[in-house]
Amino acid sequence: MTDDTRARILRAALEEFSERGYHATSVRELAERVGVTKTAVLYHFPGKADIVTALAEPLLADLDATMTKAATAPDPRAAAIEGLLDVWLTHRYLLRMNLRDLGLTASTAVFDRFRDGMLKANHLVAGPAADLAGRVRAAQAIAMLSDPVVLFADAPVDELRAAVLDGVDRLFSAGEPPARPPGRRGRPSVMSPETLEAARRLSDAGHSPSDIATALGVSRATIYRHLPGTE
């Protein structure tokens, strides 16, 4: 049996599980789609759950590496959010497979590693001193990363990435408004480093100064002042 046969089985499994669901697809049907015997499939994968484990391994490896790197980044929350989104975008068709019948949970090993990775992501996004509200907001932000990727998996990746990050920025901007001087009314004119970085990302994604100001809760004049050349 060759590695090519193993790869063909995995490709067929991803397609079948996505189209029909993990539970509705038999090993025999996978074998017929690949053009090999059922015994040949079982030679590489003793059971269907082993196929799921193999399909999920690249995603889980990327998730582990991304969260480890984010933990030592200057801004762990931003690194975790952007890194996690990039993992989902890279493996978006595997995530979409899971939408049909939670097939990824068929493997206990996959479920445990996925759960642990998501708990680490929540800790990094929420911050070490977060209260319950902060941890909930972090969970909401993380959910905002995966759902659009699953629903719009065929959309242009760059556009989808920018739109998802815009939504997450809006969530945190609403939950953590920039500080303003005591007694001052109107939108704040001072931007924190985190808000400035969010403004730059939105600008790079093609958003107008007006949209950026609304998303971050600052004035357009503040955007123009902090982002020279913005039109």
Image (tube, grey):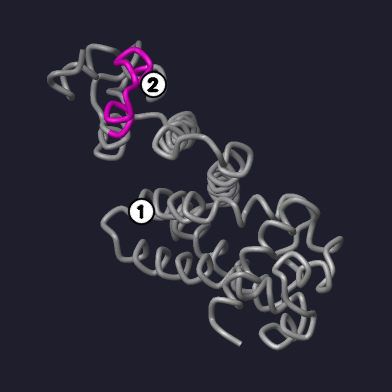
Mark 2, secondary structure of its residue: loop
Quadrant where the C terminus sits is top left
> Which residue is found at the position 60% from the left and 67% from the top?
114
The label number, if any, that marks residue 217 in the structure image: 2
Badge 1: residue crowd in 10 Å (few <14, some 14–19, many ≥20): many
Image quarter of residue 124: bottom left
Question: Circles 2 and 1: CB distance less than 8 Å?
Answer: no
Seen in the picture, residue 45 relative to 12 is either above or below; the reply is below
Q: Nearer the viewer, residue 85 or 220?
A: 85
Query: Outermost residue toward the left?
Result: 228
Q: Which residue, given by chain and number where applicable, does mark 1 sit on?
A: 79
> Which residue is found at the position 55% from the left and 51% from the top?
92
> Which segment did they paint magenta?
201-213
Q: Give the x, y percent position of residue 26.
A: 84, 69
Quadrant where the N terminus sits is bottom right
Magenta stretch secondary structure, dominant: helix
Question: Viewer-nearest of labels 2 and 1?
Answer: 1
The label number, if any, that marks residue 194 in the structure image: none
Q: Give the x, y percent position of residue 74.
A: 26, 56
Mark 1, secondary structure of its residue: helix
Kind of residue indicated by mark 1: Ala
Is residue 67 toward the left or the right of residue 144 in the image? left
Seen in the picture, residue 79 relative to 114 is either above or below; the reply is above
Kind of residue indicated by mark 2: Gly
Badge 2: residue crowd in 10 Å (few <14, some 14–19, many ≥20): many
Distance from label 2 to label 1 (Cα)?
23 Å
Q: Give the x, y percent position of residue 170.
A: 46, 29
